[in-house]
Amino acid sequence: TEAIEQLTATKDDLTSLIAQLTQDIEDLTTVVAELDKAMQEATEERTTSKEKNTATIKDAKEAQVAVEQATAVLKDFYAKSAQATALAQQSPAEDAPETFDKPYQGLLPEGGNVVSFLEVILTDFARLESETSTSEATEQDAFEKFMFESKKDKALKENEKGHKTAKRSDSEQSLAETDEELKLTQSQLDKAVAYYEKLKPTCVDSGITYEERVKRREEEIQSLQEALKILAGTDLS
Protein backbone atom coordinates (compact mmCIF):
# COMPACT_ATOMS: atom_id res chain seq x y z
CA THR A 1 0.00 0.00 0.00
CA GLU A 2 2.94 2.38 0.51
CA ALA A 3 3.81 2.13 -3.18
CA ILE A 4 0.22 2.89 -4.11
CA GLU A 5 0.16 5.90 -1.80
CA GLN A 6 3.36 7.25 -3.34
CA LEU A 7 2.11 6.70 -6.88
CA THR A 8 -1.22 8.35 -6.04
CA ALA A 9 0.58 11.37 -4.57
CA THR A 10 2.79 11.61 -7.67
CA LYS A 11 -0.28 11.41 -9.91
CA ASP A 12 -1.99 14.21 -7.98
CA ASP A 13 1.12 16.40 -8.15
CA LEU A 14 1.48 15.86 -11.91
CA THR A 15 -2.20 16.59 -12.50
CA SER A 16 -1.91 19.84 -10.55
CA LEU A 17 1.30 20.80 -12.38
CA ILE A 18 -0.26 20.16 -15.80
CA ALA A 19 -3.26 22.32 -14.90
CA GLN A 20 -0.98 25.18 -13.77
CA LEU A 21 1.19 24.91 -16.89
CA THR A 22 -1.93 24.96 -19.09
CA GLN A 23 -3.10 28.16 -17.39
CA ASP A 24 0.35 29.74 -17.73
CA ILE A 25 0.46 28.88 -21.44
CA GLU A 26 -2.97 30.43 -21.99
CA ASP A 27 -1.90 33.59 -20.14
CA LEU A 28 1.30 33.86 -22.18
CA THR A 29 -0.66 33.36 -25.40
CA THR A 30 -2.94 36.24 -24.41
CA VAL A 31 -0.01 38.51 -23.58
CA VAL A 32 1.71 37.77 -26.92
CA ALA A 33 -1.53 38.51 -28.79
CA GLU A 34 -1.86 41.83 -26.93
CA LEU A 35 1.73 42.73 -27.80
CA ASP A 36 1.10 41.96 -31.46
CA LYS A 37 -2.00 44.15 -31.42
CA ALA A 38 -0.20 47.02 -29.68
CA MET A 39 2.70 46.87 -32.16
CA GLN A 40 0.31 46.82 -35.12
CA GLU A 41 -1.61 49.84 -33.80
CA ALA A 42 1.62 51.71 -33.04
CA THR A 43 2.91 51.01 -36.54
CA GLU A 44 -0.32 52.26 -38.13
CA GLU A 45 -0.29 55.42 -36.00
CA ARG A 46 3.40 56.04 -36.76
CA THR A 47 2.78 55.61 -40.49
CA THR A 48 -0.12 58.08 -40.46
CA SER A 49 1.77 60.63 -38.37
CA LYS A 50 4.90 60.32 -40.51
CA GLU A 51 2.93 60.94 -43.69
CA LYS A 52 1.29 64.00 -42.14
CA ASN A 53 4.60 65.37 -40.82
CA THR A 54 6.34 64.74 -44.14
CA ALA A 55 3.60 66.59 -46.01
CA THR A 56 3.71 69.50 -43.53
CA ILE A 57 7.49 69.82 -43.85
CA LYS A 58 7.26 69.67 -47.65
CA ASP A 59 4.55 72.33 -47.73
CA ALA A 60 6.51 74.56 -45.32
CA LYS A 61 9.65 74.33 -47.45
CA GLU A 62 7.75 75.09 -50.65
CA ALA A 63 5.99 77.99 -48.95
CA GLN A 64 9.32 79.44 -47.81
CA VAL A 65 10.64 79.29 -51.36
CA ALA A 66 7.49 80.97 -52.67
CA VAL A 67 7.59 83.70 -50.01
CA GLU A 68 11.30 84.32 -50.63
CA GLN A 69 10.64 84.65 -54.36
CA ALA A 70 7.70 86.99 -53.77
CA THR A 71 9.79 89.07 -51.37
CA ALA A 72 12.59 89.32 -53.90
CA VAL A 73 10.16 90.45 -56.62
CA LEU A 74 8.64 93.09 -54.34
CA LYS A 75 12.01 94.36 -53.18
CA ASP A 76 13.07 94.69 -56.81
CA PHE A 77 9.83 96.49 -57.64
CA TYR A 78 10.23 98.87 -54.71
CA ALA A 79 13.84 99.56 -55.64
CA LYS A 80 12.81 100.50 -59.16
CA SER A 81 9.96 102.56 -57.74
CA ALA A 82 12.41 104.49 -55.59
CA GLN A 83 14.55 105.20 -58.62
CA ALA A 84 11.53 106.37 -60.60
CA THR A 85 10.46 108.60 -57.74
CA ALA A 86 13.88 110.16 -57.53
CA LEU A 87 13.90 110.93 -61.25
CA ALA A 88 10.38 112.32 -61.24
CA GLN A 89 10.95 114.66 -58.28
CA GLN A 90 11.53 118.35 -58.96
CA SER A 91 13.65 120.50 -56.76
CA PRO A 92 13.32 119.59 -53.09
CA ALA A 93 11.31 122.65 -52.67
CA GLU A 94 7.70 123.40 -53.03
CA ASP A 95 6.46 121.76 -56.25
CA ALA A 96 7.11 118.01 -55.52
CA PRO A 97 3.82 116.08 -55.51
CA GLU A 98 3.02 114.52 -52.16
CA THR A 99 2.46 111.10 -53.80
CA PHE A 100 6.06 110.90 -54.89
CA ASP A 101 7.56 112.40 -51.75
CA LYS A 102 9.15 108.97 -50.86
CA PRO A 103 9.42 105.56 -52.58
CA TYR A 104 6.27 103.43 -52.45
CA GLN A 105 6.68 100.46 -50.04
CA GLY A 106 3.27 98.75 -50.31
CA LEU A 107 1.61 100.05 -47.16
CA LEU A 108 -0.89 97.85 -45.27
CA PRO A 109 -4.05 99.06 -43.53
CA GLU A 110 -2.70 98.09 -40.09
CA GLY A 111 0.66 99.68 -40.70
CA GLY A 112 3.94 98.31 -41.93
CA ASN A 113 4.63 97.22 -45.44
CA VAL A 114 4.18 94.11 -47.56
CA VAL A 115 7.83 93.09 -47.39
CA SER A 116 7.85 93.12 -43.61
CA PHE A 117 4.64 91.11 -43.61
CA LEU A 118 6.14 88.53 -45.95
CA GLU A 119 9.21 88.27 -43.76
CA VAL A 120 6.97 87.44 -40.79
CA ILE A 121 5.23 84.78 -42.85
CA LEU A 122 8.61 83.39 -43.91
CA THR A 123 9.64 83.13 -40.26
CA ASP A 124 6.40 81.34 -39.41
CA PHE A 125 6.91 78.75 -42.14
CA ALA A 126 10.53 78.24 -41.09
CA ARG A 127 9.41 77.70 -37.50
CA LEU A 128 6.69 75.28 -38.64
CA GLU A 129 9.27 73.26 -40.59
CA SER A 130 11.67 73.18 -37.64
CA GLU A 131 9.04 72.23 -35.05
CA THR A 132 7.52 69.56 -37.28
CA SER A 133 10.94 68.07 -38.04
CA THR A 134 11.75 67.95 -34.32
CA SER A 135 8.38 66.39 -33.55
CA GLU A 136 8.86 63.79 -36.29
CA ALA A 137 12.30 62.83 -34.96
CA THR A 138 10.94 62.55 -31.39
CA GLU A 139 7.97 60.42 -32.47
CA GLN A 140 10.20 58.14 -34.56
CA ASP A 141 12.61 57.67 -31.68
CA ALA A 142 9.78 56.81 -29.26
CA PHE A 143 8.30 54.41 -31.81
CA GLU A 144 11.58 52.59 -32.36
CA LYS A 145 12.12 52.22 -28.60
CA PHE A 146 8.59 50.91 -28.12
CA MET A 147 8.96 48.39 -30.93
CA PHE A 148 12.34 47.22 -29.62
CA GLU A 149 11.00 46.65 -26.09
CA SER A 150 7.81 45.04 -27.37
CA LYS A 151 9.65 42.64 -29.67
CA LYS A 152 12.05 41.72 -26.88
CA ASP A 153 9.16 41.13 -24.47
CA LYS A 154 7.36 39.04 -27.09
CA ALA A 155 10.45 36.91 -27.70
CA LEU A 156 10.84 36.28 -23.96
CA LYS A 157 7.17 35.37 -23.59
CA GLU A 158 7.29 33.01 -26.58
CA ASN A 159 10.44 31.39 -25.22
CA GLU A 160 8.82 30.93 -21.82
CA LYS A 161 5.70 29.54 -23.49
CA GLY A 162 7.85 27.05 -25.42
CA HIS A 163 9.54 25.82 -22.23
CA LYS A 164 6.24 25.46 -20.42
CA THR A 165 4.69 23.64 -23.38
CA ALA A 166 7.59 21.18 -23.43
CA LYS A 167 7.37 20.73 -19.67
CA ARG A 168 3.64 20.09 -19.90
CA SER A 169 4.23 17.46 -22.59
CA ASP A 170 6.81 15.72 -20.39
CA SER A 171 4.48 15.94 -17.40
CA GLU A 172 1.61 14.43 -19.39
CA GLN A 173 3.88 11.56 -20.41
CA SER A 174 4.95 11.04 -16.80
CA LEU A 175 1.31 11.15 -15.69
CA ALA A 176 0.37 8.46 -18.21
CA GLU A 177 3.26 6.26 -17.03
CA THR A 178 2.43 6.85 -13.36
CA ASP A 179 -1.22 6.06 -13.96
CA GLU A 180 -0.29 2.82 -15.72
CA GLU A 181 2.11 1.87 -12.93
CA LEU A 182 -0.53 2.66 -10.35
CA LYS A 183 -3.05 0.40 -12.08
CA LEU A 184 -0.51 -2.43 -12.33
CA THR A 185 0.51 -2.09 -8.67
CA GLN A 186 -3.11 -2.03 -7.57
CA SER A 187 -3.80 -5.17 -9.62
CA GLN A 188 -0.83 -6.94 -8.06
CA LEU A 189 -1.96 -5.94 -4.60
CA ASP A 190 -5.46 -7.22 -5.28
CA LYS A 191 -4.03 -10.60 -6.36
CA ALA A 192 -1.84 -10.76 -3.27
CA VAL A 193 -4.83 -10.04 -1.04
CA ALA A 194 -6.78 -12.78 -2.81
CA TYR A 195 -3.97 -15.26 -2.09
CA TYR A 196 -3.91 -14.13 1.50
CA GLU A 197 -7.62 -14.77 1.78
CA LYS A 198 -7.02 -18.20 0.31
CA LEU A 199 -4.45 -18.99 3.04
CA LYS A 200 -6.55 -17.85 5.96
CA PRO A 201 -8.47 -21.18 6.45
CA THR A 202 -5.23 -23.11 6.81
CA CYS A 203 -4.12 -20.73 9.53
CA VAL A 204 -7.19 -21.19 11.75
CA ASP A 205 -7.89 -24.92 11.37
CA SER A 206 -7.21 -27.04 14.51
CA GLY A 207 -7.26 -30.72 15.41
CA ILE A 208 -5.02 -31.79 12.57
CA THR A 209 -2.07 -34.17 12.71
CA TYR A 210 1.56 -33.08 12.62
CA GLU A 211 2.00 -34.42 9.11
CA GLU A 212 -1.03 -32.47 7.89
CA ARG A 213 0.25 -29.34 9.59
CA VAL A 214 3.65 -29.74 7.88
CA LYS A 215 1.98 -30.27 4.53
CA ARG A 216 -0.22 -27.23 4.95
CA ARG A 217 2.77 -25.22 6.07
CA GLU A 218 4.55 -26.14 2.85
CA GLU A 219 1.48 -25.15 0.87
CA GLU A 220 1.36 -21.83 2.75
CA ILE A 221 5.01 -21.15 1.94
CA GLN A 222 4.38 -22.01 -1.71
CA SER A 223 1.40 -19.67 -1.80
CA LEU A 224 3.39 -16.87 -0.20
CA GLN A 225 6.14 -17.34 -2.76
CA GLU A 226 3.59 -17.13 -5.54
CA ALA A 227 2.19 -13.96 -4.00
CA LEU A 228 5.68 -12.43 -3.87
CA LYS A 229 6.18 -13.30 -7.55
CA ILE A 230 2.94 -11.50 -8.38
CA LEU A 231 4.04 -8.40 -6.47
CA ALA A 232 7.38 -8.51 -8.27
CA GLY A 233 5.61 -8.68 -11.63
CA THR A 234 6.65 -12.28 -12.37
CA ASP A 235 4.10 -14.46 -14.09
CA LEU A 236 3.06 -17.66 -12.34
CA SER A 237 4.26 -20.83 -14.02
Image (cartoon, helix red, strand yellow):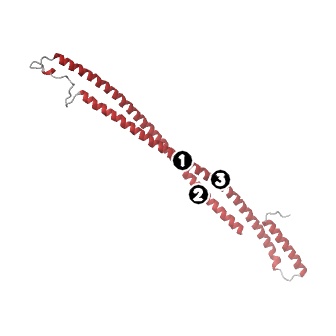
**Residue positioned 68% across, 66% down in the render:** 6
Picture disc at residue 78: none
**Residue positioned 78% across, 69% down in the render:** 192
Provide residue 200's location: percent of width, then percent of height.
Answer: 80, 75
Determine whether 162 is above or below 224 in the image: above
Q: Tell me the amino acid under the disc marked 3.
A: Ser
Is residue 34 left or right of 120 when viewed as pictured? right
Q: Earlier in the sequence, mark 3 or mark 2?
A: 2
Q: CA distance from mark 2 to mark 1?
A: 21 Å
Q: Nearer the viewer, residue 77 or 55?
A: 77
Q: Tell me the residue that label 1 is attached to.
A: 154
Q: Tell me the residue that label 3 is attached to.
A: 169
**Around disc 2, counting alpha carbons within 10 Å, would you say few (fewer than 14), some (14 to 19), or many (20 or more)?**
some
Q: Earlier in the sequence, mark 1 or mark 3?
A: 1
Q: Tell me the amino acid under the disc marked 1.
A: Lys
Provide residue 93's location: percent of width, then percent of height.
Answer: 10, 20
- Whether tag 3 and tag 2 are in contact, CB under 8 A, the answer is no
Q: Tell me the amino acid under the disc marked 2.
A: Gln
Picture disc at residue 20: 2
Determine whether 20 is above or below 191 in the image: above
**Residue positioned 83% across, 68% down in the render:** 226
Q: Secondary structure at mark 1?
A: helix
Q: Earlier in the sequence, mark 2 or mark 1?
A: 2
